[in-house]
Amino acid sequence: MKSQKNKNIKTYLTHFPIKSYLEADILSKEVTWKIMDYMRQAGAKGVTADDIIEKEGLPSSVVYSAMKELYRLDYIFLYPRNKKEKGDRKKRYVCERGTWGKYGIDEEFDATLRAEGSLDNVNYHLRQPIMKVFKDIFDDFSSKSRLQKYLPTKNTNICPNCQRSHEAMEFFYAILLRSVDLMITESDEFTKFLKDRGYASEDVKIQGIK
C-alpha cells in the first residue's frame, strides 16, 4: 500500500465492513487489496486488467479472477462505453465502492425506520445544520495552508456513473461519521440521555451536567 502522502486519491476512512461470507472470502486475499488500491488510485478514469497485471506484476489468471468477483459484488463497474475516448476499445474498470457509505444495518430495522418516517424526520432537522458545518469546514481547510493537503482533488476524479467525486464524498462522510461517533461514545449529553432512559448505570459519571 502507498503511504497517504504519496497517493493520488486520498483515503479518509480505513474500515471496510463485511456483509457476507463471500465478501469476507474475497477481501481476505492480499491480491484483492492490491487490485482495489491500484484501481482506487487510478480514479474515475478507470484501469484495464492489463494495466494491473503489468504495474503490479500479478499473474493474469489471478487478476481476472479477482476482478470477476469484485464486479459481481458491485465493488467495481465498467467504464461507460459512450464516455470513452475515441479508439479506446479495452474494458476499463472503475472502483465503485470505497469505505464511504458502506455499512450494514438490519434490513427489518431499516425498513421500519423508513416506514415510520424516522429517517425523514432526522434528515429534516439535521440537513441544514450539517450542510452549514460542511461549508464551514471546507472553507476552513481551504483557507489554511496546513490543512489544504487533506482536501479532496478537484475536477479530476468525477465518477462517470454518479457524476460526483467519491473522494470528496468520503471526506465529508468521514467528518460526519467521526463526529457522531464522538458524540455517542464520549459526550456527557448522550450519556445523560441514556441514563435518563434507563440505558446506563446510575453510577455512571457525568461531568459538567446537572
Image: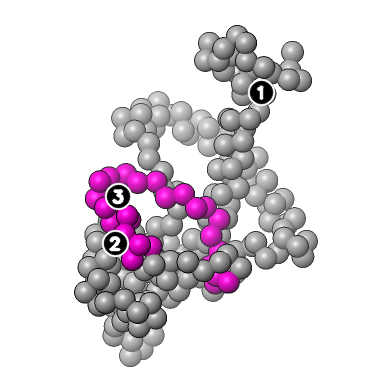
Q: Nearer the viewer, mark 3 or mark 2?
A: 3
Residue drawn 36% across the image and 68% down it: 35
Q: Amino acid at mark 1?
A: Glu
Quick one: label 3, few (<14), some, or many (20+) residues within 10 Å?
A: few
Q: Is residue 167 left or right of residue 142?
A: left
The answer to if 57 sits in the magenta stretch is no
Name the residue beneath numbered marker 3: 24
**Residue 153: image x %, image y %?**
59, 68
**Residue 160, visible in the rendered structure:** no
Q: Kindly check if marks 3 and 2 are in contact, taking CB atoms under 8 A apart as contact.
A: no
Q: Secondary structure at mark 3?
A: helix
> Label 3 to label 2, Cα distance in Å?
12 Å
Q: Secondary structure at mark 1?
A: helix
| In this rendering, position of residue 56 left or right of residue 196 | left
Judge by depth and name the residue closer to the eye, 29 or 176.
Answer: 29
Q: Nearer the viewer, residue 42 or 54?
A: 54
The residue beneath circle 1 is 189
Question: Which residue occupies 61% across, 21% down?
Answer: 191
Residue stretch rendered in magenta on the structure: 6-33
Residue that carries the numbered disc 2 in the rendered image? 70
Q: Is residue 167 left or right of residue 32?
A: right
Residue most extreme to the bottom: 87
SS type, badge 2:
helix
| 3D distance between C-alphas at marks 3 and 1 | 37 Å
Which amino acid, mark 2?
Leu
The answer to which of 110 and 31 lies nearer the viewer is: 31
